[in-house]
Amino acid sequence: MTIILDGKKTANNIIEKIKDYTFTLSKKPKLAVIMAGDNPASKIYVGNKQKKAEYAGFESIVINLPNNVTEEDILEHIYILNEDDEVNAILVQLPLPKGINSQKIIESIKPIKDVDGFTSYNFGKLALGYQPYAYPCTPKGIIRLLEEYQINTEGKHSVIIGRSNIVGKPISLMLQSKNSTVTMANSYTQNLKELANTADIIVSAVGKPHFLNSDFIKEGSIIIDVGINRTETGITGDFDFISTAQKASYITPVPGGIGPMTIAMLMENTLELYKYQRSIFY
Ligand code: GUN
């Protein structure tokens, strides 16, 4: 029998707990999001992040900047947010408009306010197996969902398809820390089907609808689909869900899988940064 990994329910439970805790605080955590350009998917994600932040009882601001914004403009906004003691967490929504150097922008965020864990300070800590101020939200959400369903990763072969800084790279490090044997694949990988068939766990972050199907998986494997692809028939992941679900032991749905977990982890990270900044971390 296949078990659907219910990210929506798990995320809602996490957010309810955060909400209850936030209610007890006289000063609320504050999340600031920089949204540059008019990428329609990014706008939806940012809207959802802001809604959840407000639901959790946080203060929240979104700074909308035009498509032709300059690097200097964004850096100036980050400088102000870095210096503002009221702001606990800064998120720059990616991708940034063409011509903007994302690396320079991300590196300008103070590590203790880097809610995505994308600065080299936090990512370096993660790579070394030390604790960063914040773990990247999507991989953290994947690990939390596996834990929620008591799925042990130790000794299991994880194949990760996609090597982005947002998902592929950090989840590979986090799964290695949990004693999984990790193989990285990407769009150049030869014999992807054969490789994926050796996986106990597959994490796909490709961004192509129906790129993968049941032929790519072995019976009883665990499928984590991070793809969010907008098609004419609605939102779908990288896997063809129906066929794959019949063969897998666990699978995340799209929507309702990793997406909501990412937002829940963003809320958790915001609260954790607030605690670090107020030195009430135990
Ligand atoms: N774009 C897609 N996913 C993410 C994310 O987790 N954080 C940021 N900042 N941008 C993204």
Image: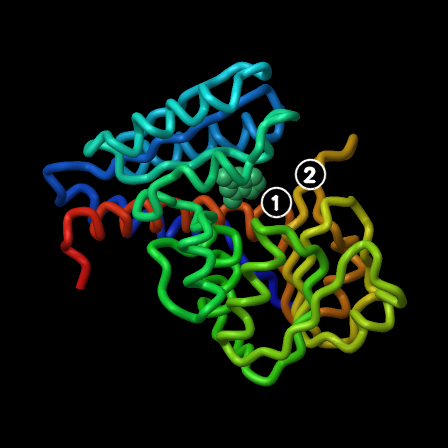
- Queried on whether the Cβ of the residue with tag 2 lies below 8 angstroms from ligand 1, the answer reads no
Q: Which residue is mark 1?
A: 255
Report the residue that reaches farthest toward the left. Answer: 26
- Queried on whether the Cβ of the residue with tag 1 lies below 8 angstroms from ligand 1, the answer reads no
**What label sits on residue 235 in the rendered view?**
2
Quadrant of the rendered image containing residue 159: bottom right
Residue depicted at 38% across the width and 45% down the height: 115
The x and y percentages for residue 122 are: 41, 55
Classify residue 130 as left or right of residue 212.
Answer: left
Q: Decide which of 119, 6 is in the foreground and name it.
A: 119
Q: Is residue 203 above or below residue 56?
A: below
Q: Quadrant of the N terminus?
A: bottom right
Answer few, some or many: residues within 10 Å of disc 2's Cα (few below 14, many 20 plus, some between 14 and 19). few
Q: Amino acid at mark 1?
A: Pro
Answer few, some or many: residues within 10 Å of disc 1's Cα (few below 14, many 20 plus, some between 14 and 19). many
- Asked whether disc 1 touches disc 2, contact meaning CB atoms under 8 Å apart, the reply is yes
Classify residue 47 as left or right of residue 20.
Answer: right
